[in-house]
Image (cartoon, grey):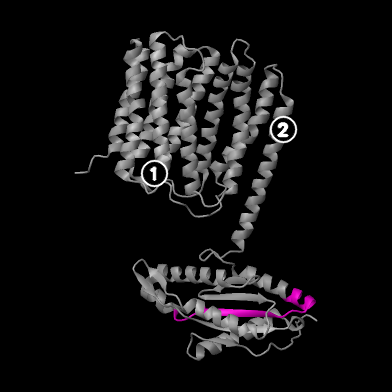
Amino acid sequence: MERIRPWRVWLVVVAVCALLRCLGQIGGLPFLGYEIPYLTITCATPVMIVIGILLNRPARPAGWIALAVAQACYAVADVLYSFDVWSTGAMTEPTPSDVFYLTSSLLTGAAVLTFIRRRTPGWDLATGLDALVVAISAGLLSWEFFVEPVAHDSTLTLSAKLTEAAYPILDLMLLILAIRLVLRSGGRSPALRLLFGFLLLMFAADTVYAVVGLLGGENTTEPFTGGLWVVSLGLIGACALHPTMRDFDTRGLATTPAATPARLTMLTIAVLMVPGLQLGENLAGRDLNVPLTSAACAVMFLLVLARMAGLVAAQRQAADTDGLTGVRNRRYFEEALVTECRRAARAGYDIGLLMIDIDHFKKINDTYGHPGGDRVLRELAQRLNTGGRAGTVFARYGGEEFIALVPHVTAGELPIIAERTRKAVADLPIEVTDQTLITVTASVGAAAAPGPLASPAELLRAADEALYVAKSAGRNQAVIAPEVPASSTAHH
């Protein structure tokens, strides 16, 4: 019999309470009759997060603890607000509940930001640009429909204006963090989907509540916004209870996010939102804030250009990179070799070439399978690429063969570099499976040529012949070719 999952039980309770919250108010129950199901969920949510932390024991609980404290603040705010409505409703803004609501938003933002920084290697500029485009578009709408009307409302005190303006600003902050979190390439675990659902539903409920408040229709829509809040709180509780929260903030691979149709659609909507707002304002006969909307359009245009430049650079990088090992590929290396030979011919410096072939690689593949062989290739590529001297161009030349171009090398330095390369392969074992370490060796063939005699074809031929000699002599050796002779293709 399958073990009962706490997060599923919790979601059933949430669904029942959300239904009671909506139907209770629609059916005309007294305030406490439909508010108690709501308060049950809002007060239980921080408890569920703490239980999730204790059950799943995430390696780094700081973000989850911040989320629990945030939801505890939210629960206190809800209790204070409900008491105010039930008793007199005479509290003036900012009320004590406002302080706790705003504190909850700040702590939730801090928790989500913690997750983002832990899940994302580096700064991930591409996703940051995407989120910024959406932020500018949503920020302009928020300013136009929420912040500016509040700022010009002469019936509100300054403290009340600041309080009411803080809500859409903090909601926008959480929306941008949610987009930043979910746009990042990597695994889409149930915990991630639940957390994103919580942030999105909370933003939707707050927005509907604010819009309806401006239109004066609270009595007809409040049951549904209340139900949305119950469901959103239920999702964050389920997120903490779900077992995948344990590895939720595991650092992902440092890859450039793909320009998926969904991502491009989102960016298109965000960019068109501002001119759409201008058109709507014009058709409605309202005054246009031309400087603000024009500035927003200009900034988003520049951001989209930067994003396109990043995509082009990423595509070029992918075209020049070996997909398995992450080092340069043969096409890139051959172009770099021609360029370097021309540069050496003009400047008069020597260049060297090393061919590195893994010994008995077929046996490794036969014994440990292609996954084991791939591990060997990746480890050696990383080891050789990081261990070379400055200016070296390193690439995977094909199969189990790597190649390195070393500019500004003297005849006396080349044997030292070749031997150091051989030892970098042989001296440390490689983890070919999770339980197995093996020693791998490589044969190295090296050739050098003075700048005026540097010819790509002759260098490759000489290094290849030296590699053949090293393998014929028993492998795990570094052999230096005789000085590369001049050829008809050399640069003078």
Q: List the residue tagged with mark 1.
A: 61
Does residue 163 lie above or below 486 as drawn?
Answer: above
Q: Position of residue 311 (x, y in %)?
A: 63, 51
Mark 2 crowd level (few <14, some 14–19, many ≥20, 10 Å Cα): few
Q: Position of residue 476 (x, y in %)?
A: 49, 85
Residue 421 visible, this angle? yes
Q: Position of residue 81 (x, y in %)?
A: 42, 17
Q: Which of the labelled discs sits on residue 295, or is there none?
A: 2
Residue at 37% x, 44% y is 245
Q: Position of residue 97 (x, y in %)?
A: 45, 20
Residue at 65% x, 28% y is 276
Does residue 219 lie above or below 126 as drawn?
Answer: above
Task: Name the residue nearer the viewer: 233 or 317.
Answer: 233
Does residue 307 lie above or below 14 as drawn?
Answer: below
Q: Are marks 2 and 1 in contact (CB under 8 Å)?
A: no
Quadrant of the snapshot with the N terminus: top left
Q: Is residue 355 magenta?
A: yes
Which three-letter amino acid code belongs to the residue tagged 1? Pro
Secondary element type, mark 2: helix
Residue 19 visible, this angle? no
Secondary element type, mark 1: loop
Q: State which region is magenta.
A: 341-360
